């Protein structure tokens, strides 16, 4: 009888233990569910805050439909029929995309991951698209909060950009991969931030931009924007105008571009003119300069412009009579040899190279004394 009583008490203790564990589990699940729904509510508030912040900068974002899920460990916001109206551009443009999926881990709410689903169209408000953009994978990540972003990254695999004119399409850009990374390295969002921007291109080509851009190239460029008063909501042209007024600059800390056998590396500092165009100089070292000069048809350009006199005069200062040789070379395929003599002979990545100044004069670009093109105004 005593043994039966002991077994009964032992069974009751086990039952109470199991019931206690079950109640604890239910309490944990209930508490976590409450916490998830609370966090989901906070996410909605954060998204609303981000939209309000962007609207102040003239960028209005909307969703045709919006749902929140991801329970139990993620907060996922699905934005169907996403669109954006950029009022700060001249003229304004409207962008539409199929779907955006934004996700944040419950235990790390300061990291927002977004996945983009194409195609994306660009149009004048209320009109048919003039650009169609597509990609295999498009993602962004934002570290920080909507009011105080710390860093942002944007990555696209196999992006293509097509110009649309009725039923006709023309490819204007394609690449294997494009990456953009930005972060604040000095100051803060509200106090004179210095922003580092890293651009990486893999097998990127822009066939309609220039014959030289039709061949795929790889690029790694690190630049730092200095001279911003803050990073409050405003269109980028307004930011660049602010930089110019404050005497700011764009420091090219490191740049490497490779196209076929041509490799160029450089660094330097650029400012903005009163017209919103680039001013300044980069020191560029180039391997395989001849193919690049041929691709931009610099020989014909120089033959029909005052640049020939500049080249010849510079060569005559190096060695009397050398300018006359350059004039003769300008009629044959050896013209680039004369241009190379203007630079400093060196070695880059184990190959013979030449170092030349890449100069920007109110948007006009010169490689040494040779004009090679123009850059657009930033405001």
Image: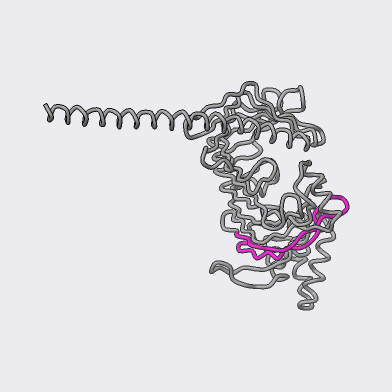
Return the x and y of residue 10 as percentages of the image width and height.
21, 31
Q: Residue at x 57, y 58 (%)?
A: 261
Residue 284, can we see it?
yes
Q: Is residue 370 above or below residue 108?
A: below
Q: Residue at x 67, y 53 (%)?
A: 184
Task: Return the residue nearer the eye: 219 or 334.
Answer: 219
Q: Quadrant of residue 267?
A: bottom right
- Any magenta on residue 139? no
Return the x and y of residue 96 as percentages of the image width and height.
67, 27
Most extreme residue toward the bottom, as rendered?
Answer: 319
Task: Return the residue nearer the eye: 306 or 92.
Answer: 92
Most extreme residue toward the front, as rendered?
Answer: 2
Return the x and y of residue 138 as percentages of the image width and height.
56, 37
Q: Is residue 61 found left or right of 154 in the rendered image?
A: right
- Any magenta on residue 267? yes
Return the x and y of residue 287 as percentages of the image width and height.
61, 64
Q: Is residue 36 found left or right of 55 in the rendered image?
A: left
Q: Which residues are magenta?
A: 263-288
Q: Is residue 371 above or below residue 203?
A: below
- Screen quadrant of the N terminus: top left
């Amino acid at each position: 009888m005593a043994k039966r009583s002991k077994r009964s008490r032992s069974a009751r203790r086990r039952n109470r233990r199991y019931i206690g564990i079950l109640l604890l589990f239910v309490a944990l699940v209930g508490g976590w569910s409450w916490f998830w729904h609370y966090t989901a509510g906070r996410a909605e508030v954060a998204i609303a805050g981000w939209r309000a912040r962007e609207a102040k900068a003239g960028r209005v974002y909307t969703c045709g439909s919006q749902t929140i899920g991801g329970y139990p460990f993620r907060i996922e916001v699905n934005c169907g029929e996403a669109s954006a109206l950029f009022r700060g551009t001249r003229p304004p443009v409207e962008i539409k995309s199929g779907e955006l999926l934004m996700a944040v881990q419950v235990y790390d709410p300061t990291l927002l991951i977004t996945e983009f689903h194409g195609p994306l169209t660009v149009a004048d408000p209320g009109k048919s698209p003039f650009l169609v953009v597509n990609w295999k994978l498009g993602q962004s990540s934002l570290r920080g909060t909507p009011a105080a972003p710390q860093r942002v990254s944007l990555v696209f695999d196999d992006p293509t950009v097509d110009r649309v004119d009725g039923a006709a399409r023309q490819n204007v850009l394609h690449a294997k991969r494009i990456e953009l990374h930005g972060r604040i390295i000095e100051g803060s969002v509200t106090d004179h931030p210095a922003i580092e921007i890293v651009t990486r291109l893999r097998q990127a080509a822009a066939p309609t931009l220039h014959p030289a851009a039709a061949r795929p190239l790889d690029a790694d460029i690190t630049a730092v924007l200095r001279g911003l008063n803050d990073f409050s909501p405003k269109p980028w042209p307004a930011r660049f105008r602010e930089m110019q007024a404050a005497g700011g600059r764009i420091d090219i800390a490191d740049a490497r571009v490779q196209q076929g056998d041509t490799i160029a590396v450089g660094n330097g500092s650029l400012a903005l003119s009163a017209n919103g165009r680039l001013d300044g100089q980069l020191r560029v070292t180039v391997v395989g300069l001849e193919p690049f000069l041929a691709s931009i048809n610099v020989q014909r350009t120089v033959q029909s412009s005052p640049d020939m006199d500049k080249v010849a005069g510079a060569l005559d200062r190096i060695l009397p009579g050398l300018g006359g040789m350059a004039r003769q070379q300008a009629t044959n395929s050896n013209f680039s040899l004369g241009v190379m003599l203007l630079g400093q002979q060196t070695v880059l990545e184990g190959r013979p190279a030449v170092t030349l100044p890449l100069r920007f004069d109110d948007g006009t670009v010169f490689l040494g004394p040779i004009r090679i093109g123009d850059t657009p105004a930033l405001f």
